Amino acid sequence: MSWLDYFRAARKDEPPPSASAAKERLQIVLAHERIGRTREDFLPRLQQELVAVVARYVAIDPGKVKLDLDRGGDMSTLAIEIELPAPTPGRQAAAG
Amino acid sequence: MAQVIVVTSGKGGVGKTTTSAAFATGLAQRGKKTVVIDFDVGLRNLDLIMGVERRVVFDIVNVIQGEARLNQALIRDKRVDTLAILPASQTRDKDALTREGVSTIIEELSADFDYILCDSPAGIEKGALLALYFADQAIVVTNPEVSSVRDSDRILGVLQSKSKRAEEKKDKVKEHLLVTRYDPNRVERGEMLKLEDVREILAIPLLGVVPENESVLKASNTGTPVIMDTESVAGQAYKDAVGRFLGEDLPHRFLEPDKKPGLFRRLFGGRAA
Ligand SMILES: Nc1ncnc2c1ncn2[C@@H]1O[C@H](COP(=O)(O)OP(=O)(O)O)[C@@H](O)[C@H]1O
Ligand SMILES: [Mg+2]
């Protein structure tokens, strides 16, 4: 390291220690992976089935389904955003 | 009956081969009849780290395929007479190792040795699975770094589900955590996971902590297992770990950072080794 780097490193605007972020991220991801080891992770199937239920009532474009999963420590959230088509007069339900 | 110990990690480059060489040598120095097997078929390296690369004639694949007898393939160490090495093949592919073949070899070695160490390849594929399949005990080598810790956790799951002991519903494989390449200075600066964090996350008994140390590279340059460098901190840390493995109650050392170098040293001096 050059002597200039020394002054750069000594400046007070260093980022906060990253080790605590490492620990937190590991604890969360491993909690989920350990569950997956003993039984199958149900979230992918839950997503599929929920979308299938909606498709029974409205014709949806599979390209317009947005899935957002956030695995957290205490709680995970699964957000499914399905864009419903504008109502077409004379049409009751999706064809299938 | 010999105890079969796998040195494993999931992730590559964390120090499995360094540990296998040091641990096997350490056990042998304590009078235990020890053989260390390289399971990294295609990427043989244990021979270099042990300094026996020029004496390899046959390898484990030759034995499995009946081209050589086990005794012809075993290399007896010239420094420690209770130590032997069974090299991996450099030219064959991984499929040359079969479970039946390895089983026969381990059975045969069991009659002559106290400890059979298996140096696992990286990954959780065939070679790694075979290296851990027959294990009674596992040394899980982990660096204080997110991907290494995650892979160690994964390999612990594999030990608990895919080892012979798991399949036969016997007592589970005894697990030991060995944290290597630990840098107390970086831990102090908050750049590296603390030992306590790694222990808390993996939650298996701690066998030892080997600091990041230049002596490991030097030892590999000369083909001397680092445990033979009795002056080095890594060598001493491995020696302690072997002692603990054999039931001794030894405090963990080398966990504290060096004294802060003065401004002058930081500006003009080299790094302390
Ligand atoms: N305690 C340590 N300090 C410094 N370097 C180390 C240490 N342990 C291992 N290394 C280095 O890390 C690299 C990978 O080690 P190796 O034992 O071959 O890992 P693996 O068998 O898990 O792939 C090697 O270059 C080795 O010299
Ligand atoms: Mg290796």
Image (cartoon, coloured by chain):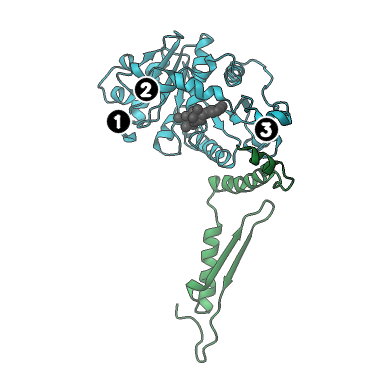
Chain colours: A green, B cyan
Horizontal side of residue A61 vs B263, given as left or right: left
Mark number for residue B87? 2
Residue B208, how many percent across, how many down? 62, 24
Whether the residue under disc 1 has CB within 8 Å of ligand 2: no
From where the camera sits, is residue B187 visible? yes
Mark number for residue B91? 1
Q: Quadrant of ligand 2?
A: top left
Labelled pair 3, 2 in contact (Cβ < 8 Å) = no
Chain letter for mark 1, please. Answer: B
Residue B44, how many percent across, how many down? 38, 28
Q: Which of marks 3 and 2 is nearer the N terminus?
A: 2
Chain letter for mark 2, please. Answer: B
Whether the residue under disc 3 has CB within 8 Å of ligand 1: no
Tag 2, which secondary structure? loop
- Structural distance between the alpha carbons of marks 2 and 1: 12 Å
Give the position of the N terminus of chain A as an image quadrant. Answer: top right
- Residue type of the residue flagged with mark 1: Thr
Residue at image coords 56%, 39%: B153
